[in-house]
Structures are given as C-alpha cells and as structure tokens.
C-alpha cells in the first residue's frame, strides 16, 4: 500500500466537517508525494530529510541512554568527549569540499560534462581522505609528544578516535555527493540511522561477549561501525555514479572548487564548532564523569532545537522567493512570522521537556539527574535564540554570507571565552551559563544585523515592519 493510498484512506475516515477543513492540506501533501516537478521533488527531499532526522534523534537518544547505563558516568563521559572531537574534526578536515560537490556537481551534470563530474567526485574523496589522514597523523604525534601530560584514561580512546577520522570525512563527502543527486535516503541514512544503530549493536555484542564496559570498548564499537557504514555507503554511491556516468576520463577544475569550498568551510566550521565547543571545553577542564552529566543534559534539551531546524528548512526557500519578487513588505511580514513559528513551538516543546527533565535524565542513571539545572539554563539560551527566528538564513538569502561569518566568529569567540572564564569558578553551571550567554550574544547580533542591513525588526514580539518603513523614508 502506497503512502498516497494511506492518505486517501485516512481522509475518508474523517468526519465530513473535518474533512472539508483538512482537504486542502491533504491535497497539497498528495501532490507533493506524486508530482514530478522541481518544487514537489524539493519538498519530498525536505520531508524525507526531516523524518530521517527525527528518527535519528530518537535512535541517538536511546543509544546514549543505553551506553550511559552500561558504562556509568565516568566512562560514558570519556566516550562522549572523544566522539564529539572525532565528529567535529572529521567534518572540518573536509575543508568544505563536502559542500562544494553539492554546488558544482549539478552544474557539470547540466552541461553533460561527465568527465568533469567524475573528476569532481574523485577529487573530493581523495582530498577528504588525505586531509583527514594528515590531521590524524598530527594528532597521533601530539599524543606521543604529550606523553604523561595527558591522563592515561584518555590515550587509547583518543588513538581510536584518530583512526576513525578518515572514514568520518569520507562519509561526509559521500553524503554531499548523494545530496547533489537528490538521493536523500542514501545521503542521510548512513550517518544518522545506520551508524548509530551499529555503534549500539557492536557495543552490546562486545559487552555480551565479555568485554569490559569502558570507553575503550565503546570507541572500538564506534570505529568498527564507522568503517562498516562508510564503506557500505562508498560502494553504494560508487555503483550509482558509474551507472549514471559510466567509466571514462577525469577532468579537473580544482581552483574554482577550492575558491568555493574554503569560505563555506569557514561558515560551516564556525557553526559546527559553536554547536559543540561547550562539550569540548568542559572536557578540557572537568573530569569525565562531569562531562557525561553535561553531555546528557545538553543532548536532552537539544530536542527543543528540532523546532528551530524545521523552521530554518521551511523558511530558506520562502525567503529566496520573496527576495526574487522584490516585495519588501512581504519579506518583513514573513520574517516576523518565521520568528513566531520558531519561538512559540520551542517554548511549548521546551516546557514539556523540562517537565519530564528529571525523568529523562534518570534514564541515563541516577547521578545524571544533577544535570537538570543545566537543562533549565540552556533552555533559556535556546529560547532567546528562537525569539529572533532564522536570522542567519535571512541574511544568507540576502547575500550577506560574509557578515554571517563575522557574526558567528564573534559568537564562537564569546562562547569559548565565557566557558574558559566561568567553568573554573562555577563548574558545569558555568559551562551551561556560558553557552546560554553565547546564544544570547548570537541572537542580539543577528537582530541588530538584520535591522541595520534589511530594515526588519526580527523579534517574535515585535512588528517587523516599522524599521523597514523608517529605512524606506531615509534619503
């Protein structure tokens, strides 16, 4: 039975009055699932991506609970810290090439230049593997030279993490290659579904076979799961590429690819570091058991951010379309609407998560409930950020990417500086306060930038148009 048939059956079961109200929504959903125009395909990709991310969040949350139960807060804290480092540096080692392939592959394909497509695919794979391997080698040298300065319990997990870096980087460029073709399931399911499931399965099998419940066992499971997932994705993507473009000569246009990838690396890299810098700094200053408590609290309250990510995904194409039409009033109106879309659902979801907060944290283990106050503090920052909506998307669609880089550089610097200042004095509460304060800084900077550049008051509780009217009245 197809999804369209299910929708039609569900519609027939509704009362007549409700059916009349829901008919337009169901009709749009049906057209999105069946039509073959560019808009419908883009909507299907967005829907599939959202579903995968929601399923992934559930899998990741369950997996983290089981791992924390198996290892306890100390070993779990070691694993969480090392795994965050692996994901961050694996992504950064691509230097933006995983995004460059999304930008250039459709262009070369539309020109029927298959040799350039093959050259691009070869380049991003080799480049990511080589750069990640160099970074891993540097990391191993640092660990060797550091010697006794690093606590012994960090050494083996860190070495295992360094061996994982090349596969993380290769997986990211394979993700980008798949996205460039519209293969959404092939792009997202390995990283967001298959890999976390395999990490958990390998960990459970190792414990069942008698291996100790330690971070070393968990990192070994993560290493095996990452290699298995990435190699499977490599074979699958390679087979589909050869079916589409065949075998043949390779052509390269490295300079334009690199000119695009490096600025993107700065934007994406800063954003990625901003998302994970708190866990990294906590790991540098606090013992592993405290890292585990902070990580559990941060990941639990992060469930609220799915609202924000959903609004960003929906708002980007709408912002672009309105700007193309040149309708400033419509742009201001929709920007204010997007801010309200982000704030009110985030408030509702956040309050529900906080109401269940101690219960959710207790699933990780009884000692993790001490992280509830961290959830409250982090939620304040998340809510402040949600109150101005997808401001960075609005600026990006207006062609202000360099301004976004500047804003996020300042925000990242503030985040790290606040963490370094507050953690030694206030511990985990200082870490949560620093991260929440950085979100407030981000929100204020975006609000000011949007108001000054576009003349829009971007705030959930404000009319977005007065500032624009004032800007129009200026000579």
Image: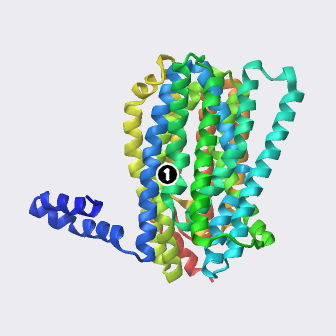
353 to the left or right of 14: right
The image quadrant that residue 239 belongs to is bottom right
Q: Residue at x 60, y 31 (%)?
A: 221
* 419 is higher (above) or lower (below) than 43: above
Camera sees residue 451: no
The image quadrant that residue 356 belongs to is top left
In the image, 54 versus 337, the foreground residue is 54
Tell me where residue 366 appears, x and y as whole percent: 47, 17
In the image, 428 versus 64, the foreground residue is 64
470 to the left or right of 152: left
155 to the left or right of 4: right
Label 1 residue SS:
helix
Q: Residue at x 57, y 20 (%)?
A: 73
| Residue designated by label 1 | 386
Number of numbered discs on residues: 1
Tell me where residue 88 appears, x and y as whole percent: 68, 44
Residue found farthest to the front: 247
Tell me where residue 428 appears, x and y as whole percent: 61, 27
40 to the left or right of 246: left
Tell me where residue 316 appears, x and y as whole percent: 51, 66
Q: Which quarter of the rendered picture does the C terminus lie within?
A: bottom right
Q: Which quarter of the rendered picture does the N terminus lie within?
A: bottom left
Q: Residue at x 56, y 23 (%)?
A: 206
Colour scheme of the picture: rainbow
* 312 is higher (above) or lower (below) than 74: below
Q: Residue at x 47, y 65 (%)?
A: 315
């Amino acid at each position: 039975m197809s999804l369209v048939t299910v929708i039609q059956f569900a519609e027939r079961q509704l009362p007549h009055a409700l059916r009349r109200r829901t008919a337009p929504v169901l009709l749009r959903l049906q057209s999105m699932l069946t039509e073959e125009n560019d808009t419908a395909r883009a909507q299907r990709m967005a829907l599939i991506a959202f579903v995968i991310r929601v399923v992934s969040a559930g899998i990741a949350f369950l997996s983290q609970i089981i791992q924390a139960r198996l290892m306890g807060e100390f070993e779990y804290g070691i694993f969480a810290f090392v795994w965050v480092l692996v994901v961050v540096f694996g992504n950064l080692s691509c230097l933006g090439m995983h995004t460059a392939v999304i930008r250039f592959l459709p262009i070369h394909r539309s020109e029927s230049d298959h040799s350039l497509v093959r050259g691009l695919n070869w380049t991003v794979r080799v480049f990511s593997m080589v750069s990640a391997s160099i970074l891993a080698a540097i990391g191993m040298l640092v660990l060797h030279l550091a010697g006794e300065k690093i606590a012994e319990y960090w050494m083996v997990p860190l070495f295992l993490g360094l061996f994982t870096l090349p596969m993380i980087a290769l997986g990211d460029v394979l993700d980008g290659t798949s996205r460039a073709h519209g293969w959404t399931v092939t792009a997202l399911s390995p990283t967001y579904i298959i890999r976390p499931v395999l990490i958990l399965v390998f960990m459970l099998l190792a414990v069942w076979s008698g291996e100790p419940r330690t971070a070393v066992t968990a990192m070994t499971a993560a290493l095996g799961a990452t290699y298995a997932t990435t190699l499977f994705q490599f074979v699958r993507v390679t087979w589909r590429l050869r079916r589409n473009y065949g075998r043949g000569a390779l052509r390269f246009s490295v300079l334009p690819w690199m000119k695009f990838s490096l600025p993107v690396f700065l934007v994406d890299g800063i954003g990625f570091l901003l998302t994970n810098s708190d866990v990294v700094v906590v790991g540098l200053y606090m013992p592993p058991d405290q890292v585990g408590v902070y990580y559990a609290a941060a990941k639990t309250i992060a469930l609220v951010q799915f609202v924000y990510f959903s609004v960003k995904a929906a708002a980007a194409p709408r912002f672009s379309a309105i700007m193309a039409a040149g309708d400033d009033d419509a742009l201001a109106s929709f920007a204010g609407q997007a801010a309200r879309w982000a704030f009110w659902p985030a408030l509702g979801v956040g309050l529900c998560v906080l109401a269940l907060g101690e219960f959710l944290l207790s699933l990780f283990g009884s000692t993790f409930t001490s992280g509830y106050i961290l959830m409250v503090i982090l939620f304040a920052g998340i809510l402040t950020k949600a109150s101005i909506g997808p401001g960075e998307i609005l600026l990006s669609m207006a062609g202000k990417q360099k301004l976004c880089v500047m804003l996020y550089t300042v925000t990242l610097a503030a985040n790290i500086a606040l963490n370094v200042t507050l953690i030694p004095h206030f511990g985990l509460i200082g870490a949560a306060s620093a991260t929440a304060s950085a979100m407030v800084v981000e929100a204020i900077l975006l609000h000011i930038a949007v108001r000054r550049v576009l003349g829009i008051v971007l705030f959930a509780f404000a009319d977005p148009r007065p500032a624009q009217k004032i800007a129009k009245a200026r000579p």
